[in-house]
Image (tube, coloured by chain):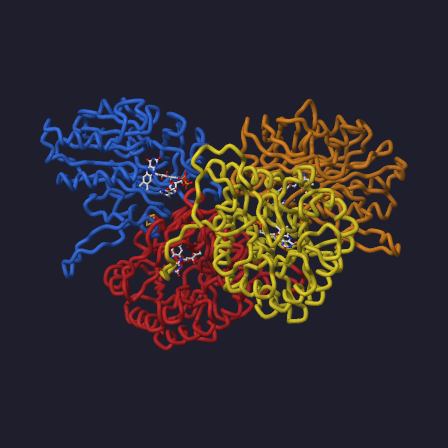
Chain colours: A orange, B blue, C red, D yellow
Amino acid sequence: MHRYFKAKITGNTPLNEQFRLLTLIPLSEIEIPSPGQFYMLQASSALVPLLKRPFSIFEHQAGTLKFLYRIRGKGTSCLAGLGMDDTINVIGPLGNSYPEPQEDFIAVAGGIGIASLLPLLSRFKKKAYLFYGARNSDELVMLNEAKSLSKEVAITTDDGSEGQKGLITDVLRDFLNSSRITYHALQIYACGPMPMIKELSSICMNKGLRCYASFEEHMACGVGACHGCVIKVRRQNTEDRTQKWIYERVCKEGPVFDVREIVWE
Amino acid sequence: MHRYFKAKITGNTPLNEQFRLLTLIPLSEIEIPSPGQFYMLQASSALVPLLKRPFSIFEHQAGTLKFLYRIRGKGTSCLAGLGMDDTINVIGPLGNSYPEPQEDFIAVAGGIGIASLLPLLSRFKKKAYLFYGARNSDELVMLNEAKSLSKEVAITTDDGSEGQKGLITDVLRDFLNSSRITYHALQIYACGPMPMIKELSSICMNKGLRCYASFEEHMACGVGACHGCVIKVRRQNTEDRTQKWIYERVCKEGPVFDVREIVWE
Amino acid sequence: MGIKRTEDKIQKTPNLSVNIAGLKLKNPVMTASGTFGYGEEYSEFVDLNKLGAIVVKGLSLIPKDGNPTPRVVETPAGMLNAIGLQNVGIKAFIKGKLPFLRQFQTPVIANFFGDSIDEYVRAAGELSSADGIHALEMNISCPNKQAGWIVFGTDPKIMEQVIAAVRRTTALPLIVKLSPNVTDIGFMSKVAENSGADAISLINTITGMVVNIKERKPVLANITGGLSGPAIRPVAVRMVWEVYKSVRIPIIGMGGIMTANDALEFLIAGARAVAVGTANFVNPTATIEIIQGIERFLAEDGLSDINEIIGSLITGDLNHDMP
Amino acid sequence: MGIKRTEDKIQKTPNLSVNIAGLKLKNPVMTASGTFGYGEEYSEFVDLNKLGAIVVKGLSLIPKDGNPTPRVVETPAGMLNAIGLQNVGIKAFIKGKLPFLRQFQTPVIANFFGDSIDEYVRAAGELSSADGIHALEMNISCPNKQAGWIVFGTDPKIMEQVIAAVRRTTALPLIVKLSPNVTDIGFMSKVAENSGADAISLINTITGMVVNIKERKPVLANITGGLSGPAIRPVAVRMVWEVYKSVRIPIIGMGGIMTANDALEFLIAGARAVAVGTANFVNPTATIEIIQGIERFLAEDGLSDINEIIGSLITGDLNHDMP
Ligand SMILES: Cc1cc2nc3c(=O)[nH]c(=O)nc-3n(C[C@H](O)[C@H](O)[C@H](O)COP(=O)(O)OP(=O)(O)OC[C@H]3O[C@@H](n4cnc5c(N)ncnc54)[C@H](O)[C@@H]3O)c2cc1C
Ligand SMILES: Cc1cc2nc3c(=O)[nH]c(=O)nc-3n(C[C@H](O)[C@H](O)[C@H](O)COP(=O)(O)OP(=O)(O)OC[C@H]3O[C@@H](n4cnc5c(N)ncnc54)[C@H](O)[C@@H]3O)c2cc1C
Ligand SMILES: Cc1cc2nc3c(=O)[nH]c(=O)nc-3n(C[C@H](O)[C@H](O)[C@H](O)COP(=O)(O)O)c2cc1C
Ligand SMILES: Cc1cc2nc3c(=O)[nH]c(=O)nc-3n(C[C@H](O)[C@H](O)[C@H](O)COP(=O)(O)O)c2cc1C
Ligand code: FES
Ligand code: FES
């Protein structure tokens, strides 16, 4: 049972122009991942791109690992070029995971952020109020799966091509302001672009809600060794009990943090 | 009609463990190559390997270019990894070519050197006494083609697994020493490892024969710009008519040189 | 320097021309010395009239044979070369190569070197009197035979002497090409400026070595060679930025430029022009694609003039934190 | 040193152990500081008992927060880092990290730094009195706050002072880790040797920069960072060879080692041991594969002892030809 293993690609399916679903079959016994954890995937056997890239576990089932990814730069382009039966090296599962939700919960996904949240929806079926925002209807990937796993789903797109036009955080705010549900017991789980998380953080501050978000940083090692991937986190000083910030590693202490701990710049 | 063009791979067939036959369809109109010329082939679209690699034209026919290559290091391994419908950039045809043989001629191929000589055999059918040496029978690639295009064929292998056991230059020497043919009018065309060419050179010196050999050097540009690929060549000084050596470019003034001109170290 | 963005969609193509020490280039993309021969070698692949400038292979007073082979070897995302500055010599260049280049509207920059101050001065003199040479680029990454074979460009005093001497010899724009194999490139560029350079070009190659482990021998016959190509680009961009902070004269940046985006890194960091070297070997039409790519970038960003992005790097205050 | 080849097929496995300043390593492969955390992070991937030595992340007297992010960015066949030497501080290291490392039979080398001579000396003192540290590696690629933030390792005088001061403080083997950002690495290694270093390690990273062209900003928050990985290997091998010609103390070579063949280049060029850095990120079991690969190479070459290949590079006479 190793966290460094070879895996065979058995699927690398385009979902739209930029999103792909990668299916891997590990060639040795692996650890079982929890929702929120991630893997470092090798994108090429050449020296360019050199470093592995981090991707959240999207699905683990019957000995296969699935990842949902968006083509952004060199690494993901290379990954997209890999074909059936190619073999890549993988490290994982890495990092912490989303804490277990108490009863129902709110999930907020921005774009590819759905990749990280879907395993949570899947483990706690029909418990989530899902808020899912994307650029356009085409980029609302895995919508049917998400709907079938959630209690309720609210959708926004930047261009209004599906759901409401606008920001998903605005819809969430309205939802919380509506007296339809008592939300105080609901924890929020989020993954998406930084501005979305930041906005969420201020909403939660306002409403006194607890929110766990998955963060991203450039990573080199993924295992806590290089200190490349840090984030400013408020911590109690154990000696004099004062508050101070320290840099914690997204790959090790994260990627999931309680947003109240994050020091926003 | 350009010497820099894209080409689609339509075949990359293993002939044995290390030898492959690459078939390209140029995606634009190209110049027609002559026997002895070469092309710079891109091995990867990544930055590693960076430089193109030189390969002799093996066959040009009906709009396709064929190359016979041996897997040696990074570049050729990468090339071997390319598949159907991959597209690569190509520069060529480059360099000079074998001068036209007068009537019958002798061709001496060492291993993969057959790649460079076969187009000559093919253009001047049944005119060649071919001397073809290789490590073993497995590496005597394209033997049937070579036989059908030559007047006579002598074979050696290092391990005796086909033809005579030993060096092809020894067999050539015996052939020349035998009074069976008047060889003085025969020109020799050669491509193979350096020690073979050097030995040939001394045989030709002895017998007063003219020998044109194709040379190899590490190349960066292939077009005469970098001066990376030079070889020491004897040249007449045009001013004072003395002999001196100069470095000439294998990619531009070569790859084919009259071996009498070469300054051996 | 702020970034101006023109409000409306740009109708006309952006201005790409830049001025290097009085020399007007139609665009900021030139060839790097030693990688483009004497222009002729690539003229079937590239319309030489489209280039910002052509920098020819390094020239010396007396023709040079160069080093034994192997002279080149590939390294990860780069290559080492130890050509040994083989060249036909200035006389033969002027007689045999320059007439071809005079056919084009593109400025010709003659890169040259010597192994003594005297040789530099005489080389600069001969080149300056030739018709069709628009600027000189002095390669100072060569050992000085009069000073224990110390490389000119690594010793500030020797460097000052040789630049000042050449400066007195020529009225042509004088570009000094710096060696990256120094502790403080900003300081060296200042020395060059103070000694009379009209412009700085950098970086030349970084010295490196590859070992053939089976034979226990260096792969290159010359033992060491100069590293070029994408591998060195981050070092080159950093050095251009350091020089930009140190001098007022224009900078020509190079080192691992393969694409327009790479070239733009140098321009933003402070280079007024760039040179394309190793990339020519990989893609003979690289220079043209880079020019087109820069133009496209400007248009897409709504910029009307390349000069708006030169030195436009936004940095906060420098801190002295540990690297 | 000639290459001895044992005639008959080798029965027993070749000796891999080397001696660095009195420290016996079971094999010449160690980890490079800052790329292997405090050992623990990779202990599930690598049997730490199999390593030649463990070099831990750079330590300072006072814990350091490090730089803002982004701290890392990939470059062609390499990466830049500007971690800013974030570390828990020597006290916390000794209390919290060292006990774990003491479980293993592998020597622990503590890499440390300071921003003043005083801080270096006190750091060396604290580390020397701890149980389970077998050697010190001094990182001198840090700016000196008492001397205008000049990097210790780029100024021979300051370098001499800080090494000599640390030398007086510790009885442990003292490895000085050189900065490659200098004009003459051979000279700098000589200064380190004369100042009391027991061994030299090199190279540290080469300063570089990547620009985000859309935002006109450096990608790294720290503007510049240190280039590591295969891209720099030719430079590192060359520098190891230059140092090998300059000093008599042992050399630990590093810079872009990914495979056993890469490591062998360094050993042949004169390194008595090697360190593996960036490769750990790419392949967490790289160190072990390199050890196995070196052993296989020796066996296949019929060599019985790693020491036979150290410094075995065959070079003809050096000439002073132009590069
Ligand atoms: C814990 C974690 C989980 C992630 N999960 C997913 C996922 O499930 N699906 C998905 O599509 N993406 C995910 N990402 C983002 C993904 O890692 C980046 O998109 C990818 O690394 C970009 O690589 P590239 O070479 O294509 O882009 P590059 O050309 O390298 O850069 C494009 C942009 O990607 C970002 N980036 C570059 N390198 C890294 C790196 N090493 N780590 C993080 N970001 C980087 C930078 O913002 C950069 O500007 C995750 C990131 C983290 C940290
Ligand atoms: C004019 C010419 C025609 C050739 N024709 C053929 C052919 O038809 N079929 C064939 O199999 N091979 C041919 N070669 C040899 C072929 O180019 C090399 O085998 C190939 O470049 C090796 O690349 P690599 O990356 O696999 O090897 P590397 O890992 O780079 O090195 C392996 C060995 O290949 C040689 N080599 C490396 N780079 C070059 C280079 N740029 N130029 C020349 N040699 C190099 C060196 O001796 C090196 O030790 C020809 C070479 C030349 C110069
Ligand atoms: C094969 C080769 C030959 C070179 N010859 C010269 C030269 O004669 N004079 C010179 O100043 N620089 C010379 N250089 C250095 C280049 O001009 C350039 O500074 C360097 O290669 C970095 O740019 P690049 O990475 O784009 O190649 C040469 C470089 C190469 C690769
Ligand atoms: C992320 C990172 C952190 C590093 N931290 C240190 C350090 O704390 N102290 C030090 O002396 N060198 C440090 N280095 C330099 C390495 O130890 C090594 O010298 C360099 O990376 C070259 O080796 P490589 O190419 O194998 O990585 C660091 C390198 C990297 C990539
Ligand atoms: S990526 Fe290296 S510590 Fe997180
Ligand atoms: S390979 Fe560049 S001149 Fe021949």
Q: Is residue C315 visible?
A: yes
* Snapshot quadrant of residue A11: top right
In the foreground, A176 or C187 = C187
The residue shown at (44%, 30%) is B85
On the rendered structure, is C145 left or right of D133?
left
Q: Where does the image place residue B201, in percent across and percent down from the top left?
A: 21, 41
* Snapshot quadrant of residue A12: top right
Q: Where does the image place residue B29, in percent across and percent down from the top left?
A: 32, 37
On the rendered structure, is D293 left or right of B86?
right
Q: Where does the image place residue C286, in percent across and percent down from the top left?
A: 42, 49
Residue B105 lies, with reference to residue D177, above or below; the image says above
In the foreground, D102 or A124 = D102
Q: In which quarter of the image is the N terminus of chain C?
A: bottom right
Q: How many marks?
A: 0
In the foreground, C68 or D18 = D18
On the rendered structure, is D266 left or right of A160?
left
On the rendered structure, is A159 left or right of C160?
right
Residue C137 lies, with reference to residue C207, above or below; the image says below
In the foreground, C285 or C299 = C285
Q: Can residue C308 be seen in this view?
A: no
Q: In which quarter of the image is the C terminus of chain C?
A: bottom right
The residue shown at (81%, 44%) is A258
Q: Where does the image place residue D195, in percent across and percent down from the top left?
A: 60, 66
* Snapshot quadrant of residue D68: bottom right
The residue shown at (74%, 36%) is A36
